[in-house]
Image: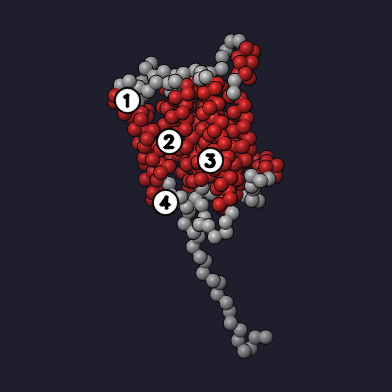
């Protein structure tokens, strides 16, 4: 079990590092948009810094496979949310992004939520499910994917209004978070096929399941959508929102779909549910808009004297 906690914390480091590196690379690129996916891919694949960030994220997915084989889904999500603290710190140091007082209070709540979830774990008493019915997974995931793509498109249309207050990225974060939530369930499903014997049969069984195809869809659309959103919004806000939505989606629907039981002990149950609920409050505490930029004072003009032509 504690190997799972260590893998979850490692995944947090890899995810936070990957997002910050990608954000820094995107800041030096021309404006990218989901309406030009080929151009977006050409730009990002030509940036060594962006490739380094994407490799860190891919390593985070590998660590996540270990997590889902050793920890219940709900407990894993509570630990994943703690990565927001590191993300905000890295964004402040490496990207120069400032956080508001409300966002700093939210980070304190995240740390408390992490402690509550970790305290709810007990070696040998938590069940870790290995499979879920494919029709149930599709019933959960397909509408969520459609909602995420629609929500992102709506945010894009509203952002194009010239006089609209600049968005902080909450809508983008929710949309991408839904896609990553589906991806998280797919990773959980793939982890159930990991084996050291009968590899060929396991691969064939995996290809007959919906999980690799859900990963392909969320990987392609999530890549394009997240890069465009990262370029125009603060990483220290859009990534926490995305992470919170992903964790909530996975904890609630994943626990139900994979049939994992919550702790029977009342204290551990209260800690597990309370920690997850406290993490969700981060999303509600986030401001919906960034303050408009302060107007710059006009540059002083030098008046011509009678001696100047």
Q: Tell me the mark number nearer the camera, choosing from 3 and 2.
A: 3
What is the distance, in whole Å, between disc 4 and disc 2 at their CAs? 18 Å
Residue wearing tag 1: 268
Q: Earlier in the sequence, mark 1 or mark 4?
A: 4
x%, y% of residue 219?
A: 61, 33
What is the distance, in whole Å, between disc 1 and disc 2 at their CAs? 19 Å
Q: Earlier in the sequence, mark 1 or mark 2?
A: 2
Is there any visible trace of residue 292 in the rendered image?
A: yes
What is the distance, in whole Å, between disc 3 and disc 4 at their CAs? 23 Å
x%, y% of residue 234?
A: 51, 48
What is the distance, in whole Å, between disc 1 and disc 4 at their CAs? 33 Å
| Disc 1 and disc 3 in contact, CB within 8 angstroms | no
For label 2, count other residues whose C-alpha is less than 10 Å away and answer few (under 14), some (14-19) or many (20+): many
**Quarter-of-image position of residue 121:** top left
Residue wearing tag 3: 175
Q: Is residue 269 left or right of residue 161?
A: left
Q: Tell me the mark number nearer the camera, choosing from 1 and 2.
A: 1
Quadrant of the image containing the N terminus = top left
What is the distance, in whole Å, between disc 1 and disc 3 at their CAs? 32 Å
Residue wearing tag 4: 100
Q: Residue furthest top?
A: 198
């Amino acid at each position: 079990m504690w190997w799972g906690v260590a893998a979850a914390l490692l995944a947090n480091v890899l995810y936070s590092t990957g997002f910050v590196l990608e954000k820094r690379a995107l800041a030096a690129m021309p404006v990218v948009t989901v309406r030009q996916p080929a151009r977006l891919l050409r730009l990002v694949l030509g940036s060594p810094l962006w490739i380094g960030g994407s490799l860190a994220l891919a390593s985070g997915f590998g660590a996540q496979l270990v997590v889902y084989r050793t920890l219940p889904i709900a407990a894993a999500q509570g630990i994943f949310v703690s990565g927001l603290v590191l993300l905000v710190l890295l964004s402040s140091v490496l990207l120069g992004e400032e956080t508001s007082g409300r966002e700093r209070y939210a980070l304190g709540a995240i740390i408390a939520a992490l402690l509550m979830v970790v305290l709810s774990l007990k070696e040998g008493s938590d069940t870790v499910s290995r499979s879920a019915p494919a029709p149930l997974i599709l019933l959960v995931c397909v509408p969520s994917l459609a909602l995420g793509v629609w929500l992102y498109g709506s945010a894009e249309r509203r952002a194009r209004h010239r006089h609209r207050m600049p968005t902080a990225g909450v809508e983008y974060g929710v949309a991408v978070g839904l896609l990553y939530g589906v991806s998280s369930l797919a990773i959980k499903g793939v982890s159930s096929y990991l084996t050291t014997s009968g590899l060929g049969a396991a691969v064939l069984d995996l290809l007959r399941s919906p999980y690799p195809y859900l990963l392909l869809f969320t990987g392609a659309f999530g890549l394009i959508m997240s890069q465009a959103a990262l370029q125009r919004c603060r990483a220290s806000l859009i990534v926490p929102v995305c992470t919170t939505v992903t964790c909530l989606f996975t904890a609630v629907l994943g626990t139900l779909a994979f049939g994992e039981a919550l702790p029977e002990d009342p204290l551990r149950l209260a800690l597990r549910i309370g920690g997850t609920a406290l993490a969700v409050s981060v999303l509600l505490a986030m401001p919906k808009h960034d303050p408009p930029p302060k107007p710059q004072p006009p540059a002083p003009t030098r008046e011509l004297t009678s001696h100047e032509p």
